Every structure is written in structure tokens, then in C-alpha cells.
Image: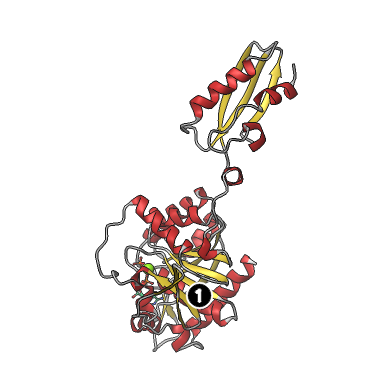
Amino acid sequence: MDEKQIIESLQFVLHPKLKKSLIDIGMIKNISVKGGAVTLDLALKSERSPLRKVLVAQIEKAVGALPGVSSVQVGIITLSREEFEKIFPRAPLKGIENVTHFLAVASGKGGVGKTTVAVNLALALAQHGLKVGLMDADIYGPSVPLMLGITETLAQKDNMIIPKEKYGLRIMSLGMTASSNEAFIWRGPLVSKMIHQLFDQVNWGELDYLVIDLPPGTGDPSIAVANAIPHCSILMVTTPQEVALADVRRAIELFHKTGQTIVGLVENMSYFICSHSEQPIEIFGHGGGEKLQEETGIPLLGTLPIDLELQQGGDSGVPLLVSLPDSATSNIFRTIAKKIADQMH
Ligand SMILES: Nc1ncnc2c1ncn2[C@@H]1O[C@H](COP(=O)(O)OP(=O)(O)OP(=O)(O)O)[C@@H](O)[C@H]1O
Ligand SMILES: [Mg+2]
């Protein structure tokens, strides 16, 4: 008896949904035969898969029926995400079929400037001649419309939502829907469904970049984005102080677990240049971004100052890259955007 016979015997053990043999779809691995003892591994999505019991029984029966087999030992291993997606390809998300790169702006902590960075980076990429969309995935507190001065609600065509065009960006936010002022309690499955719809039912069209503004933390929306777009890269925003770093570390860990690539770190509110002196004042301490870079190997792509014009740009709906494109801070955004574009190409 050899491996070939085992494989043949398993041709008739089918995946109940796919109706294809476990052998053909790659869910049987590591077959070994020693005398009459057969061991093999069954690769499942998770060890707790509801299919486990029934498939193990069918494998034992099929292999056990071969002449010369004295025992069958089925081990359970888990499929890597790539393997899983190869076996169970998902329906493509309609709205983003023609989007080349995805970049989500994240941080472990609230209020560190994610939205400010997402908005101005998206503008820097657009001013670089790229086609850029900006998706507000902060379903709890969408602030993209405010920062871009958008008050109109969204239009629909052919059952798809049309993103709003402004400052050369295509923008979509739940803050641009008629019910945006209603308090809504988002629970896990709903969050995931909503995020899915923002990719599937918004006609993003052809884009070089879709920049995604995530809410703070490591909650459902971040996981929903990772699930919907496994190849989405992440940009982490932090502030210099140690308390912010702890949260950022947790977020980095989450994105490692979901298998996302973290393209870099941006340290925001790093220093303040006072009008009376050239010397930067490090209000929130020093070196958080550098420390994280050393610890994690994730490159620090830039440090942004505390800039009152940047803040006013956010409040007035005319972002800094539009109101003062030649300012020192605007230049830093462009440098960061260039580094990201170079890396993601
Ligand atoms: N470098 C900066 N200099 C001055 N003000 C800044 C800077 N970065 C962000 N701000 C201001 O800090 C506030 C919070 O920024 P922002 O909304 O971008 O943070 P966030 O991380 O997206 O917050 P949330 O976690 O609530 O989504 C805003 O008023 C913004 O204008
Ligand atoms: Mg925000």
C-alpha cells in the first residue's frame, strides 16, 4: 500500500459545499504510510470547524477500507489565509474592482490625527497626479465630511452610490448620508456588513489609491476592512508620548495577525515651532516614532509638527494641502506620500 492508493481512496470524500474532493482542493496534507498505519492531516479553516467531525469520519472510513490498512490517524491543521482564499474565492467587491492600491490610516488611539493625516495624504497623492479616493471607515464618528467641507448628501446611480468629488478626491462617508446625525449603535455583524457595502456598493471607479480613514483602536471596523481587503496596506499614526505607543503596539499586533502590511509610521504632533524661535518645542515628549521604528522595524516615514493652520484647515473644511500647499507641513505630507507611493509600487 502506498500514498497513491490513499489519494485514490480519498477522491470520493467530498467537501459538502463545494462538492469537490478534499484531495483535489488541497485540504489533505502530510500523508504518511508506515506498515499498515496511515497518518494524514486535514486542513480546515479553524480547528473548531463544524465540518471536522464528519470529514474525519469519512476519511477514516475511506482509508480504513483499503486492504492492508491497520490504523488511520487524522490530524487537524488550519489553512493559511492564502490557502483558504484559494479554495473559497470570494465574490469580487463591485465598487473597488478598478482600484489598484489600498491604504488604511490607523492608530491604536483616538485623536492622534488619523483623519487629518488621511485627508492631507490623500490630497498629496492626488496632487502628485494620481487618482485618489478617500473612504471614511469611521462609522462611529465620521469626520471626513467636516474636514473637507462637504455638506451635500450622496447621489445614487444604477443602485450604486456615487462618491462626492472635491479637491480632486472621490470621497465617501456615512457622514454624507441623510441619517448621519442619528446616533446609531453599531454591533459586530452590522459593522462588517456596512464596511463591506462601502467597498461593494460605492462606485469608486478607476483609482490608483483608495485611502481609508479607520476609527481608533483595534475593533470591528479595522478587522472588517482587513477581511474585505486582505491586501490593504496600513499606515500607523502615533504621537510621541509613551501612553500613545502602548496602544499603537497593540494595533500593530492586530494587523500582524490579520496579515496586513504596515507600510510605515507617522509621528504626529511631534513638535511645535513657536514664532519667536526656530527651536522646536517637543510638547508631547520625544522620540516615540523612532522608538517604535527600532522596536518593530516599521519605517518612520515622517514627523509632523503641531501646526495651528493644519488644525484650522480641518475645522474650516479647507485642508492645509489646499489652503497652504507650499507650507513646511504641506511639504512633509508630500514627502510622506512620495515614500508611501514608492514603497507600494
Ligand atoms: N499636527 C497637528 N497640529 C495641530 N492640530 C492637529 C494636528 N493633527 C491633528 N490635529 C487636530 O487634532 C484634532 C484631532 O485630529 P483628527 O480628527 O485628525 O484625529 P483622529 O485620530 O482622526 O481622531 P479620532 O480618533 O476621533 O478619529 C483635530 O482637531 C485636528 O485638527
Ligand atoms: Mg478620525
Q: Is residue 288 visible?
A: no
Disc 1 secondary structure class: helix
Chosen colour scheme: secondary structure
Tell me the quadrant of the picture where the C terminus can be found: bottom right
Three-letter amino acid code at the position of disc 1 = Ala
Residue at left 36%, top 68%?
Answer: 174
When the figure is inspected, residue 20 is found, relative to residue 332, above or below; the finding is above
> Which picture quadrant has residue 21?
top right
Residue at left 51%, top 65%?
Answer: 95
In front of the other: 282 or 91: 91
Q: Is residue 72 visible?
A: yes
In front of the other: 279 or 288: 288
Residue at left 52%, top 57%?
Answer: 229
Is disc 1 surrounded by few (<14), some (14 to 19) or many (20+) residues within 10 Å?
A: many
Locate residue 144, reporting x and y percent: 38, 73
Locate residue 272, reporting x and y percent: 40, 79
Q: Quadrant of ligand 1?
A: bottom left
Locate residue 236, reporting x and y percent: 48, 63
| Residue at the disc numbered 1 | 122
Locate residue 298, reporting x and y percent: 55, 59
Q: Is mark 1 within 8 Å of ligand 1?
A: no
In front of the other: 180 or 16: 16
Asked if residue 70 lies left or right of residue 169, the reply is: right
When the figure is inspected, residue 58 is found, relative to residue 294, above or below; the finding is above
Tell me the quadrant of the picture where the N terminus can be found: top right
